[in-house]
Image: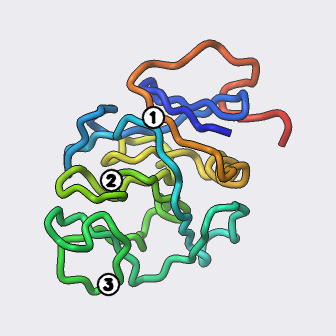
Amino acid sequence: MNLIVYSSGEAEWDNGRVRCALGLGGISHKKREGDGVTPAGRFLLRHVFYRADRIERPRTTLPLSTLSKKAGWCDSPFDTSYNKFVSLPFRGHHEKLWRNDAIYDLFAVVGYNDRPVIPNAGSAIFIHVATPGFEATKGCVAFPLPDLLKILENWQPESALEIRTSGLGAPLTAPYGHPTAKN
């Protein structure tokens, strides 16, 4: 299963289509730290995190960890921990992953700018839970929780996330918002 994300704010997988939110700056091959752009390309998912106090343990073949109140992600370009999970308190600039809203109740780390890490090329790129109004992200791709749960459940070791600068592909047979009739 490949998850293909289009600049139209839709994604295809398992012969179905789902709506998603993208970065405020659109999709580009030239991602920079803080620009609000979702990076274009083909990526693996590295690790899944979830809030055990809010959702049940998700089913996935990916490495899985529960979040704690001390969870953070370094977004300081010249810190040695740049674009990595960190424990709080943390000396460098970072994003707190334990939030009052639901967007990080479940998320997967996208293998972007991590092997190797390039300073200022962008950090904290995740697929995570969308807001109810599908508000733009800071560069991530966001899905409704039920769709994200199904995506992660069906993810296989050979699966890839493809983020494309083009619009949606050919019409599909599955109805909008229903990724597959098999599940």
Q: Secondary structure at mark 2?
A: loop
Q: Which mark is residue 88?
A: 3
Quadrant housing residue 73: bottom left
Q: Within 10 Å of the Cα at label 1, are there few (<14), some (14-19), or many (20+) other Cα atoms?
A: many
Give the vertical position of 171 relative to 15 (above or below). above
Query: In the image, what residue occupies the spot 29% across and 38% down?
Result: 24
Q: Position of residue 112 (x, y in %)?
A: 38, 51
* Element carrying mark 1: strand
The amino acid at mark 2 is Asn
**Position of residue 6 measured from the top left corner of the image (x, y, whole percent):** 47, 27
Label 1, on which residue? 163
Judged by depth in the image, the label closer to the viewer, 3 or 1, is 1
Q: Report the side of 3 relative to 111 (left or right).
A: right
Instruction: Evaluate if marks 3 and 1 touch, with contact meaning CB atoms under 8 Å apart.
Output: no
Q: Amino acid at mark 3?
A: Leu
Q: Residues within 10 Å of mark 2 (few under 14, many from 20)?
A: many
Q: What is the tally of numbered marks visible in this picture?
A: 3
> Farthest left residue?
78
Q: Residues within 10 Å of mark 3 (few under 14, many from 20)?
A: some
- Viewed as shown, does residue 38 lie left or right of 146? left
Residue extending furthest bottom? 89
